[in-house]
Amino acid sequence: MLYYNHGMYRILHNWFSRNCQAINVSFIEQQLNFNSYFLLNKNDKVCLNYLKNIFSKKVKLNFKEIEIPLSKKEFFSNWFNSIKNIHYIKKLIDQFNVIHFYSNVFILPIPSSKINLLTSRIKIKEIEYLKKLGKKIVLHFQGCDLRTPLTSITFQGISVCSYCNYRFSYCSEQKVKQRVNFIKTLIELVDKIVVTTPDLKLSIPNSIVFPSLPINLLINQNQDFNFKYGFDRKKTLKILHAPSNFNKKGTIFIQAVIEKLKSKGLDLELYILHKRSWEEIYKIAHSIDLAIDQLLVGWFGRFTWEMLSLGIPTIAYVEKELKNYFSLTTPPIIETTLFNLEKTIIEIYYNREILDMYRKKIKEYFSNELNLDKIKMLISQIYTF
């Protein structure tokens, strides 16, 4: 495991493999002078490469290694019979007064997909144990760890869950009922709940919306954004779409629209990067004119934030109602719907000056609306108990 030290208060973020959200939040807390640490599996090449490529060139990192005699897999498969490991965890936790968990992954990292009666009881016992130790608990939901066919909001006459392939496994009727009951119990136990998108706040009204802000933005806070300007109407319009899940992001609809427009003579090139590392996405993003995020959920995700921080105009479906629940000013996104995507792309294709207009809006937004002072106020709410 690795931990990353920041500042004054003692907050422990657990790891969330492949998402690296704990890294993002912990880095933001550096700006607040919190003494913030995150746990990270040394074998998690995705997050380690993310740290190496996104951070190290611009931000000095002070990593320290905590020795554990076993690999992550061995460590937790021996959880119940290894006194040494239990002692280690207890010793580690004693150093912190706030534990910040992500996506139902607690000390024993049983993923949400493995929630059943036994594992949910284990997790609840973990929280109860930490509460007895006097720890403050923050629970951070990021999407389908909270969203289910029973709680998903229908927008555009469509529920994202109706298209999601998880409904046959992770969201089977039995597992959904177990997960919903489990989450209800957790909500009563923890001190603060954080969600990444406003649609999740509809499920937990007293939660705090803290979006997946891009590290690139935070690193560049005191620098001029090096956005490219200018356009060529004769040039191929290059579009990037990087879905974590084809079904949930509306990828099949995007592909269908692009193919239809290409058959009509529009010079378009669609790059789809599925489950790729952020390093790969960043490399190709610098040659992209336009990005498309999700078209079903009703809000935008981390991909939009990352693209905007690079000055790339981004299309997404944003439900107007959800803006009322967002804790920051909504960024300048090219808003469309599933049914208007074709019209939106045609308008941009023949009026490329729209891209420059949005690039300027993006720069103004990051310079004026989304600054560290506002982010500090928001994250301070999370740790005010």
Image (cartoon, helix red, strand yellow):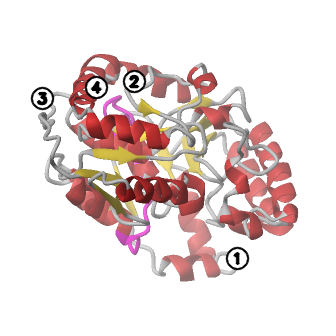
Local packing at callout 4 (Cα closer than 10 Å; few below 14, some 14-19, many 20+) is many
Asked whether, in this view, residue 298 is left or right of residue 218, the answer is: right
Residue carrying label 4: 366
Image height of 151 relative to 169, above or below: above
How far across and how far down the image is residue 293, in percent? Answer: 45, 46
Secondary structure under the numbered disc 1 in the rendered image:
loop
User: Distance of mark 3 from mark 1, alpha carbons?
Assistant: 53 Å
The amino acid type of the residue labelled 2 equals Lys
Closest to the camera, between mark 3 and mark 1, is 3
Question: Start and end of the magenta stretch?
Answer: 27-45
- Which label was assigned to residue 80? 1
Q: Which image quarter holds the N terminus?
A: bottom left
How far across and how far down the image is residue 165, in percent? Answer: 67, 66
Asked whether, in this view, residue 45 is left or right of residue 288, the answer is: right
The amino acid type of the residue labelled 4 equals Phe
Local packing at callout 2 (Cα closer than 10 Å; few below 14, some 14-19, many 20+) is some
User: Distance of mark 4 from mark 2, alpha carbons?
Assistant: 15 Å
